[in-house]
Amino acid sequence: MPAYHILNGDCLAEQLRHTKINHDFIVCRECLIEGPLIATNPNEFWDIRAKFIAESFNVSVADYFSKTVTELKKTDDLPDYSEVCLWFENDLFCQTNMWFILSMLSNRPGLKLFRVFPAIENKADLWKGFGTANTERLEQSYAAKIPFTPLDIESGKNLWTAYQNGDLNKLKELSEYQSACFEHLKEVCQAHCDRFPGDGNPGRPEKLVKELINTHSKEFHEVFAEFSAKEGIYGFADLQIKNMYDKLMQQY
């Protein structure tokens, strides 16, 4: 049975090239934790995302389509009865991308889907994911892959729909689902809901960034390091934190 691997980024692809695992990779180059998500059809969705990425991350629309859309559309060509391994970490950034992938694949019952988790030995490294894994640990992660049940796939699809529509109540309801394929689901969904307190106050991430600027340092690299240590559950890259940081620094 052929095996394919859907990965959470190019860094992981480079790490896996040094293992004995076959190199049939599809790389997810999205950041669905940010930007507009509502669309009436797939083509409109890609157009909306392309416009947002181009405006936010200095990437051309053409590059987005060639590097992100074309890559993800490779999932359309996955042969039936293939083993498809989803290599995604537990933080919100990775989970939103994984829910999206599960939604894309939910109409392909012939595929055999598996979740591959990072092999975390130290609890303090919970949100660091695959980043620090060596060849041996990556191969251990693959050997310990867990099959998605039909109910898991349906839950992933429903999580994506609730997230896409900004339905926080539904997301909280779905976060009660328990499965070996969804570790820390309740915590992650709550972290997302905390971004939108609904009382006019800043969301949880902005609140921490402001606190760090006021009490720790006004240097971005230090704010980013402290945020990542305290709120690794979000999985934010430096660009996400920098946007919050820049807006808050305008107040000083």
Image (tube, rainbow, N blue to C red):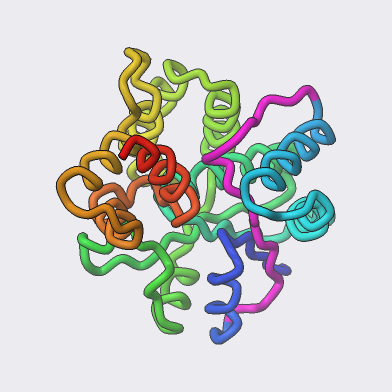
| Frontmost residue, 235 versus 122 | 235
Q: Residue at x 55, y 39 (%)?
A: 34
The vertical placement of 93 against 221, above or below, is above
Q: In which quarter of the image is the N terminus?
A: bottom right
Kindly report the secondary structure that dominates the magenta region of the rendered protein.
loop
Residue furthest toward the left? 215
Q: Is residue 130 left or right of residue 220?
A: right
Q: Position of residue 6 (x, y in %)?
A: 63, 60
Q: On the image, which quarter does residue 228 sit in?
A: bottom left
Residue 199, visible in the rendered structure? yes
Q: Where is residue 80 in the image (x, y as percent from the top left)?
A: 79, 54
Q: Is residue 185 magenta?
A: no
Residue 78, visible in the rendered structure? no
Q: Which residue is drawn at 45% across and 83% down?
A: 135
Q: Is residue 103 left or right of residue 156?
A: right
Q: Which residue is drawn at 21% across and 60% down?
A: 123
Q: Quadrant of the C terminus?
A: top left
The vertical placement of 116 against 157, above or below, is below
Q: Is residue 25 magenta?
A: yes
The vertical placement of 33 against 134, above or below, is above
Range of the magenta residues? 21-40
Q: Residue at x 66, y 62 (%)?
A: 27
| Frontmost residue, 65 versus 243 | 243
The vertical placement of 166 against 46, above or below, is above
| Frontmost residue, 234 versus 135 | 234
